[in-house]
Amino acid sequence: MSQTAPITELLDIMRQLRDPDTGCPWDIEQDFSTIAPYTIEEAYEVADAIDRKDYTDLKDELGDLLLQVVFHAQMAKEAGLFDFNDVCAAINDKMIRRHPHVFADEAQRDSDTQTEAWEDQKARERAAKNRADSVLDDVPVALPALKRAQKLQKRAARVGFDWPDADRVLEKVHEEITELRDAAAHSTQEHVAEEVGDLLFVCTNLGRKLKVDVEAAARGANTKFERRFRYIETHLAAAGRKPEDASLDEMEALWVEAKQKEKAAAAA
């Protein structure tokens, strides 16, 4: 049995895969931009395993995500940019720097205070990198739209551009719904799409005010919809029918039944 540390073995596997003479042709052809979509996909698969509470799968998916880090680090090493050890050193430094209440002689903080201090430190780091043209600089465009909206709103809030409380945001939600109704009745499809976007954006802001991760909330809503719709399909199939054979009222009644069963199970 090999006595090599697993991370060392993984780094060596990646080095061999990228070897220009004896490596894998596909791995050799890749670059940062071609691998980036796989990195994003693997992060989503980690989140999916967590949502499903499948911790055996989570172990595998975290390995897949780690492979992405190793892949990028190997390409960077080949280009003379940095290597895996530099990646580790950078995150070590960052964690120590952003947690002075743990690694230095600062007083302990509660979670909210620590979050604020974390954001302050990140702002100082951005300023040190000369990214001061806008407080919105370096919010990644490739983020999922809802996640990016929440990050943009958080940045703007740091300089005072924010509603004072959730009630004011709820008022804005009602205002946007009114504007959407008007657009749907009287305007172009392009305008309707714009108003739908505005409504999603302000709902995202409401989630931020209520300390809800809107991306996670949306995933949860998708999962709930899928679970309840499958309940409809299963019960119709037991009677030899398909959803297209049933009326909307029938399917709605099964939806309500599924919802009630979930509530009863949660209360038990």
Image (cartoon, grey):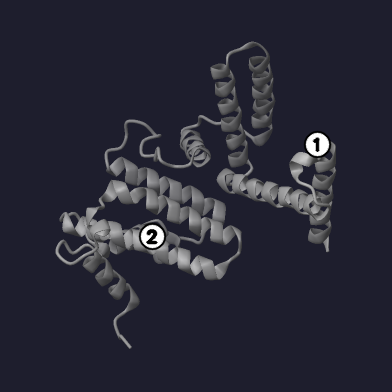
Residue 215 seen by the camera = yes
Q: Is disc 2 placed on a helix, strand or loop?
A: helix
State which quarter of the image contains the C terminus: bottom right
Residue placed at 69% from the left, 46% from the top? 225
Eye-nearest disc, 1 or 2: 1
Taking the image as shown, residue 172 lies to the left or right of residue 144, namely: right
Residue 128 or residue 229, whichever sits in front: 229
**Three-letter amino acid code at disc 2?**
Met
Q: Position of residue 137 (x, y in %)?
A: 36, 35
Asked whether residue 211 is in view, the answer is no
Residue sitting at x 64%, y 46%:
222
Q: Position of residue 217 (x, y in %)?
A: 62, 46
**Left or right of residue 15: residue 174:** right
User: Tag on residue 95?
Assistant: 2
Task: Identify which residue, 96 or 21, lies in the foreground.
Answer: 21
Residue under label 1: 248
